[in-house]
């Protein structure tokens, strides 16, 4: 009886895999959508691994959490994201605001928020979540530099991620890098955005640096911008898109050009 | 009610509890030794002192009494799930269909009396066919058990006071010369109803056993109960888990027969000394798979802030399904989507069992523009209710709402143009931010039915180093306030 059930389960698994074909779930890496970054990384970041995101300075905490969330969005696709925060992070950096998640391109209803009292709780919840293969991505935000978050703890997380294929993102808003077993380590700072009309702040921009990579890639810096509509990163240093072409041979239209720059709705 | 332990100092000395009534210290309760000296409750303390100079006096503590009574009621749940508290000093147990488990009513009564005497209590117990008759007989009579249908005869000789009606009515009835319940039962009913109201007759009927009235248990009656009794108390964690596992197997069969699954499970551990410890778990969907429930219980027992203290051991472990919902036999789908949803639900349940249900949350949209109330958090184990849709951002627009929100908003020192310009620079957490880019104002006013807060003008700001902020001015300049204050409400990624 048990044999038959096992055989059935194996068949079902095979069918599920065949049905998905080359869907993103089957792929082992996820792309950031920007060839400039994906190229050196070898096509993207590993899905079944632990990635660390550090804030360059404490005020960059929100940028680091934003970048970590975006990576989780990219890795999870449609599957649910589990985000684990330590209570103190709410006090220090503000609580996670769901409409802000919508603005980053994620439906907050499919995100499960776990609030843990201490770093040990964060790690415990993260392990539990990473071991569940149905989860798309797991983010964990311990505060400060807790003693429990050592090489052993990150190794445990990495092994669990490798076994289940769930991407784990360890976001550290107020900590300095320490030895860990993460596949990649990023340092993130907020970067000036490209101004929109009337000098309004533009799309979220990040100055990211790859500090460490398992494959031994050299450290690199990029300036990227998050594009919610295309669900990918853009080159933050490229020319702004809102340039009105000036035609030399039609003088009557030049005068009307500045008047028609498609006003944005603000608020 | 609460007495010092029997091995305390000089048990022979009478003990009285006192309470302040209308400015005078009066005895609220007396023990048996004091009663023998003629002290009764209601006597003033000075009179009592004159009669018995060597008595021990303590303050009455009604709150502690009530808590103690609740504890006894909890312990009595071992006999029946229907136990009601009859304040201030009584309990009513509904033994219908329970007595045979203890070998009959007399055996159950003896067991209860023995347990109560073990914790130093003496109790007067009466078995009767209706709760009111039992209550009246226990407090004012000497009958131990009333034969079926014999309530009217047993209650008849009791004084009018035994009826659970207001003291005014009791006084009026006794002035009218009606001393016992039997006197009252023989009177014609319409004049009584006209003089004292229908309540008196209803109470009389209940006490005489003419009308059967169920009690209101102090804990809601569960959907299904399975329990295991131990001849020898158990004290090891493995034993509890093994017992729970067995019980869950039994409960699963019961639930399966009814086509139901449990949403809330409660395990009760009855200690030999009358203390009951309850541990409950909640699931996001109806379950009856013992493996799932046991996994949640293991998580929960491991994460208990104050671990299960067996004391001298538990002699009864009970598993109750408090809430059950229909659960059909599921057809597994081939594409695995159903399995994925189940896995996520299982994960949420395990996390909720370990960290508490209010720590595993989901965002729900609320239909308002107020940033503080725009997003609600509900426990993820609860079924998703019908909710409002999230506001869709305009294509190609930068985020209009921050990723992090401060609650409450943080005050900042600002240099801004009057009346409604954006800040040029502001100081937050002792750091000065020079503003490079700004957009606004976006005016967000509270709804007209909550006109308690001022209108807020929100600005999106970016400082020279690229940090993006969401700040607001509290109140319209000149119209609502002369010196508007500024707050930082959120941070953008």
Image: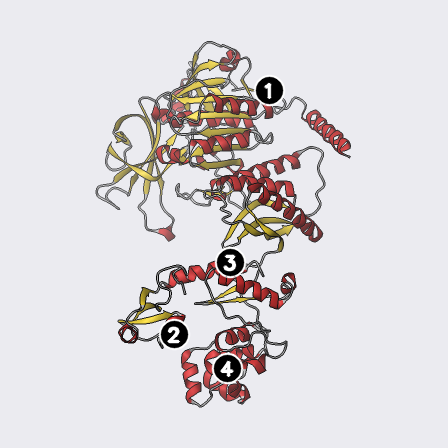
Place residue A210 in its image quadrant.
Answer: top left
Which residue is identified by label 2?
B35
Ranked by sequence position, the earlier of labels 2 and 4 is 2
Q: Chain of mark 1?
A: A
Whole-angstrom CA distance, mark 4 to mark 1, is 84 Å
Q: Kindly indicate whether the residues beneath marks 4 and 1 are on one polypeptide chain.
A: no
Nearest the eye: A161 or A197 = A161
**Mark 3 or 1, which is nearer the eye?**
3
> Which element type, helix, strand or loop, lies under badge 1?
loop
Spatial distance from mark 3 to mark 1, Cα to Cα? 56 Å
User: Could you confirm whether marks 3 and 4 are on the same chain?
Assistant: yes
The residue drawn where x is 61% and y is 25% is A25
Q: Distance from label 3 to label 4 (Cα)?
A: 30 Å
Residue B82 on image: x %, y %: 56, 62
| Label 3 to label 2: alpha-carbon separation | 30 Å
Q: Which residue is mark 1?
A: A28
Q: Are marks 2 and 4 on the same chain?
A: yes
Q: Which residue is mark 4?
A: B158
């Amino acid at each position: 009886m048990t044999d038959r059930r096992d055989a059935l389960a194996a068949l079902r698994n095979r069918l599920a895999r065949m049905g998905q074909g080359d869907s993103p779930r089957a792929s082992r890496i996820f792309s950031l959508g920007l060839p400039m970054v994906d190229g050196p990384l070898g096509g993207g970041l590993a899905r079944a691994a632990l990635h660390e995101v550090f804030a360059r300075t404490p005020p960059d905490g929100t940028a680091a959490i934003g970048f970590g969330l975006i990576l989780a969005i990219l890795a999870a696709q449609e599957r649910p994201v589990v985000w684990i925060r330590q209570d103190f992070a709410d006090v220090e950096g503000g609580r996670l605001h769901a409409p802000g998640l919508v603005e980053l391109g994620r439906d907050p209803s499919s995100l499960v928020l776990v609030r843990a009292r201490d770093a040990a709780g964060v790690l415990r919840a993260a392990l539990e979540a990473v071991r569940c293969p149905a989860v798309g991505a797991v983010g964990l935000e311990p505060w400060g530099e807790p003693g429990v978050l050592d090489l052993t703890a990150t190794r445990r997380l990495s092994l669990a991620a490798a076994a289940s294929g769930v991407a784990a993102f360890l976001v550290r808003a107020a900590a300095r890098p320490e030895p860990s077993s993460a596949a990649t380590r990023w340092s993130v700072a907020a970067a000036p955005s490209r101004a929109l009309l009337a000098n309004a702040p533009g799309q979220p921009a990040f100055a990211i640096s790859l500090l460490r990579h398992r494959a031994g890639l050299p450290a690199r810096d990029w300036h990227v911008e998050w594009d919610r509509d295309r669900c990918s990163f853009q080159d933050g240093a490229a020319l702004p898109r809102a340039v009105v072409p000036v035609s030399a041979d039609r003088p009557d239209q030049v005068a009307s050009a500045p008047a028609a720059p498609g006003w944005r709705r603000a608020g | 009610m609460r007495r010092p332990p029997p091995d305390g100092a000089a048990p022979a000395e009478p003990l009285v509890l006192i309470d302040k009534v209308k400015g005078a210290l009066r005895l609220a309760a007396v023990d048996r030794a004091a009663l023998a000296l003629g002290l009764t409750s209601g006597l003033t303390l000075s009179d009592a002192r004159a009669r018995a100079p060597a008595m021990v006096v303590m303050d009455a503590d009604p709150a502690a009494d009530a808590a103690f009574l609740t504890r006894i009621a909890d312990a009595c749940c071992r006999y029946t799930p229907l136990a009601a508290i009859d304040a201030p000093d009584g309990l009513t147990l509904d033994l219908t269909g329970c007595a045979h488990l203890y070998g009959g009513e007399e055996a159950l009564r003896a067991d209860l009396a023995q347990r109560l005497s073990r914790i130093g209590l003496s109790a007067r117990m009466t078995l009767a066919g209706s709760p009111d008759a039992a209550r009246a007989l226990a407090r004012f009579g000497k009958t131990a058990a009333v034969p079926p249908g014999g309530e009217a005869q047993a209650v008849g000789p009791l004084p009018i006071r035994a009826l659970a009606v207001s003291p005014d009515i009791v006084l009026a009835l006794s002035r009218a010369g009606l001393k016992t319940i039997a006197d009252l039962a023989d009177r014609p009913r319409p004049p009584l109803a006209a003089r004292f109201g229908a309540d008196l007759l209803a109470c009389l009927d209940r006490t005489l056993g003419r009308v059967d009235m169920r009690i209101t248990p102090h804990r809601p009656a569960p959907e299904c109960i399975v329990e295991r009794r131990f001849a020898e108390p158990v004290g090891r964690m493995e034993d509890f888990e093994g017992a729970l596992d067995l019980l869950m197997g039994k409960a699963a069969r019961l639930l399966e027969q009814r086509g139901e699954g449990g949403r809330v499970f409660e395990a009760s551990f009855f200690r030999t000394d009358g203390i009951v410890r309850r541990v409950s778990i909640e699931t996001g969907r109806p379950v009856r798979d013992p493996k799932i429930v046991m996994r949640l219980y293991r998580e929960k027992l491991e994460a208990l802030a104050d671990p299960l203290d067996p004391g001298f051991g538990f002699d009864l472990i009970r598993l109750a399904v408090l809430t059950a919902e229909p659960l059909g036999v599921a057809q597994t789908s081939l594409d695995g989507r159903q399995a994925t949803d189940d896995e996520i639900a299982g994960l949420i349940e395990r996390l909720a069992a370990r960290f508490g249900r209010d720590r595993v949350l989901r965002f729900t949209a609320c239909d308002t523009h107020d940033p503080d109330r725009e997003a609600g958090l509900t426990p993820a184990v609860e079924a998703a209710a019908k909710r409002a849709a999230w506001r869709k951002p305009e294509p190609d627009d930068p985020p209009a709402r921050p990723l992090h929100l401060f609650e409450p908003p943080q005050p900042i020192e600002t240099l801004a143009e009057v009346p409604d310009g954006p800040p040029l620079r502001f100081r937050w957490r002792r750091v000065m931010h020079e503003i490079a880019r700004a957009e606004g104002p976006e005016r967000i006013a509270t709804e007209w039915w909550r006109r308690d807060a001022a209108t807020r003008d929100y600005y999106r700001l970016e400082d020279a180093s690229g940090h993006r902020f969401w700040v607001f001015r509290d109140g319209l300049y000149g119209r609502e306030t002369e010196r508007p204050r500024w707050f930082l409400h959120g941070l953008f990624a």
